Image (cartoon, rainbow, N blue to C red):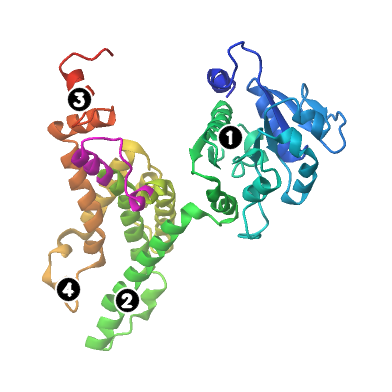
Amino acid sequence: MEKMCADALPLTMNSSEKQEIVCIFGTGDFGKSLGFKMLQCGYSVAFGSRNPQVSSLLPRGAEVLSYSDAASKSDIIILAMHREHYECLTELVDSLNGKILVDVSNNRKINQYPESNAEYLAQLVPGAHVVKAFNTISAWALQSGTLDASRQVFVCGNDSKAKHRVMDIARTLGLTPLDQGSLVAANEIENYPLQLFPMWRLPFCLASVLCVFFFVYCAIREVIYPYVNGKTDATFRLAISIPNRVFPITALILLALVYLPGVLAAILQLYRGTKYRRFPNWLDRWMLCRKQLGLVALGFAFLHVVYTLVIPIRYYVRWRLRNGTITQSKLGYLTLILCTAHTLVYGGKRFLSPSILRWSLPSAYVLALIVPCTVLVMKFILIMPCIDKTLTRIRQGWERNSQHSKSALNGKSDI
């Protein structure tokens, strides 16, 4: 991480190579963690406090001053304080005029106030450039080097120069800034930390729908059908047998859905002939939650293993345990191929046997193979040399209708 900070340091250093000073109002957990991280990455830090005094809890090398004295040290001030304490800034309106104020605050509940904290701050100090940032990064994430936490920093503000200054600082700290537009977006950004697992909502909903559908489907075939036709009571299957069918089917489909958006994105790039156009919002959301989809699929695979151990142990249990942990890159596709093959081998000739149909309904395993087989066929087409070559060039920056790309192909590029 120190190397990362060092590599990014020139983004915020002045031409004289003098360390840039950043002022932080507030000496709480977040303010201390942010100040320590900034010192690590080459910044000089001046803390503003109501009771300015040097403490062993604060990072060594940082100054601790009053609000007014600290504000005079830098033109960028990070407010690591709660909204309730913003009133003290009204006494510093003149000294804060023209400065960049970075609001990192959050609320206790969604839409707690009529306006966002950042917009409220802009009203209190109208002469300052208010930027909303860093509120989705925790003090723990800063202390742990962001290795085990999200690196995304959502940034918004009405002044583009001020916003880019803050984004440069975020990059220097090893974070990934995402421009969310004007200060109007601050309300949405402040709600992000209060949302319960926002990236998990779609995977959980999708998994729930698949589970319910296949459970009902299997119950119709294996419980209701035998009772209607032969008065056979098969309700005992509802406890173990049917769930042990539903879990692997859901895991296989979810695993296929992890890689389907990448295939669709590749097709869209081939159609457009460029990578410099945004994907549709639904595809963007789908791609952002692929990791969660894979983890949910792994969870269902684990449940399948547990249920299989409840039933008499079968020869393929150990294979499933090894297979369920491979979820990334080309190994992920290998896992998908092996799981699909496992389903085909398990079903065997029963897939095509007319005797397996019940009320014209095929086995649930047949339905489970539709999405995985579709993904594998589409991926096989995309890796064909004639298509893969074009797709690779597009992802390297080539554009079908770009004059620069055409000249580069003819050997006339200066690069």
Label 4 or label 3, whichever comes before in sequence order: 4
**Distance in Å between CA atoms under marks 4 and 3:** 58 Å
**Distance in Å between CA atoms under marks 4 and 2:** 14 Å
Q: Secondary structure at mark 4?
A: loop
Q: Closer to the observer: label 1 or label 4?
A: 1
Residue indicated by mark 3: 403
Q: Main secondary structure of the magenta part?
A: helix
Q: Is residue 274 magenta?
A: yes
Q: Quadrant of residue 314?
A: bottom left
**Distance in Å between CA atoms under marks 3 and 1:** 41 Å
State left or right for residue 301 relative to residue 101: left
Q: Is residue 306 visible?
A: no
Residue indicated by mark 1: 146
Which quadrant is the C terminus positioned in?
top left
Residue indicated by mark 4: 357
Q: Nearer the viewer, residue 380 or 234?
A: 380
Label 1 or label 4, whichever comes before in sequence order: 1
Percent coordinates x, y for residue 128 in the rendering: 66, 38
Which quadrant is the N terminus positioned in?
top right
Q: Quadrant of residue 203?
A: bottom left
Q: Residue at x 26, y 76 (%)?
A: 221
Range covered by the magenta-colored residues: 264-284
Is the residue marked by circle 1 packed among few (<14), some (14-19), or many (20+) residues within 10 Å?
Answer: some
**Distance in Å between CA atoms under marks 2 and 3:** 60 Å
Q: Residue at x 88, y 31 (%)?
A: 53
Q: Closer to the observer: label 3 or label 1?
A: 3
Q: Closer to the observer: label 2 or label 3?
A: 3
Residue indicated by mark 2: 219
Is the residue marked by circle 4 packed among few (<14), some (14-19), or many (20+) residues within 10 Å?
Answer: some
Is the residue marked by circle 3 packed among few (<14), some (14-19), or many (20+) residues within 10 Å?
Answer: few
Label 3 or label 1, whichever comes before in sequence order: 1
Q: Secondary structure at mark 2?
A: helix
